[in-house]
């Protein structure tokens, strides 16, 4: 494709029906599943970003990405904010900062914490505030456990000294 513009292209998927037995009721349910998009082979090679959107949850999974989304660990509903960020990236070449965990070396990606998503920037800022270095969520959790165990051990030793 040789276009002098940005294009958003949607494709239909082949559809198949599967029968599944409900474990609780024992009834057979028929469910519609999307398979592969109807396209020529290697069609996704032509695109900067390819996502598969689940028809039930409307959440997008990245299939191919030459943007910044995979580095952030994007998984979610496509919304206006995502469109604005993609437009800024396409028009201005603004690359979001990619963070690497100083403990394990893994790329720091957006992570769901409770009911909200934390961006890589938020994760790094919180980790630096608490531990003085950029850390992924997994390493933050491990460090929290280590610190808590150390505090409990110190408390136990203080109690023994007081006795």
Image (spheres, rainbow, N blue to C red):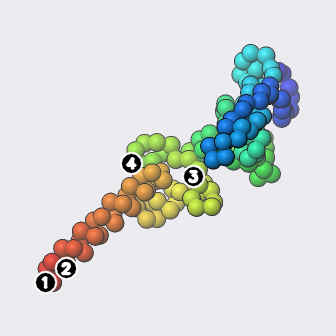
Say if mark 1 contacts mark 2, CB within 8 Å: yes
Residue placed at 37% from the left, 58% from the top? 143
Residue placed at 43% from the left, 56% from the top? 140
From mark 3 to mark 1, how far is it between C-alphas?
45 Å
Which image quarter is the N terminus in? top right
Q: Is residue 21 at all visible to an observer of this figure?
A: yes
Neighbour tally class for label 1: few under 14, some 14-19, many 20 plus, Cα within 10 Å: few
Neighbour tally class for label 2: few under 14, some 14-19, many 20 plus, Cα within 10 Å: few
Residue placed at 63% from the left, 61% from the top? 115
Return the residue nearer the eye: 61 or 74.
61
Q: How many labels does the image show?
A: 4
* Quarter of image, res 152: bottom left
Residue denoted by label 1: 163
Q: Earlier in the sequence, mark 3 or mark 1?
A: 3
Marking on residue 111: 3
Marking on residue 103: 4
Q: Earlier in the sequence, mark 3 or mark 2?
A: 3
Q: SS for tag 3?
A: strand
Q: Nearer the viewer, mark 3 or mark 2?
A: 2
Neighbour tally class for label 4: few under 14, some 14-19, many 20 plus, Cα within 10 Å: some
From mark 3 to mark 2, how far is it between C-alphas?
39 Å
Q: Earlier in the sequence, mark 3 or mark 4?
A: 4
Q: Position of residue 90 (x, y in %)?
A: 76, 39
Q: Where is residue 131 in the image (x, y as percent from the top left)?
A: 40, 61
Q: Viewed as shown, does residue 29 lie left or right of 142?
A: right
Which image quarter is the C terminus in? bottom left
Marking on residue 159: 2
Q: Earlier in the sequence, mark 1 or mark 4?
A: 4
From mark 3 to mark 4, how far is it between C-alphas?
17 Å
Q: Which of marks 1 and 4 is in front?
A: 1
From mark 2 to mark 4, how far is it between C-alphas?
33 Å
């Amino acid at each position: 494709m040789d276009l002098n513009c940005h294009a958003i292209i949607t494709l239909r998927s082949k559809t198949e029906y599967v029968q599944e037995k409900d474990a609780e009721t024992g009834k057979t349910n028929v469910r519609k599943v999307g398979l592969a998009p109807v396209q020529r082979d290697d069609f996704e090679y032509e695109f900067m970003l390819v996502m598969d959107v689940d028809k039930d949850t409307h959440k997008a999974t990245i299939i191919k990405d030459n943007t910044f989304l995979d580095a952030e660990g994007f998984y979610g509903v496509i919304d206006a904010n995502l469109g604005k960020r993609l437009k800024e990236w396409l028009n201005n070449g603004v690359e979001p900062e990619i963070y690497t965990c100083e403990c394990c070396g893994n790329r720091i990606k957006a992570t769901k914490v409770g009911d909200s998503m934390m961006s890589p920037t938020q994760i790094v800022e919180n980790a630096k505030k608490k531990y003085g270095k950029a850390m992924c969520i997994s390493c933050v959790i491990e460090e929290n456990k280590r610190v808590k165990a150390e505090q409990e051990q110190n408390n136990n030793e203080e109690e023994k000294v007081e006795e």
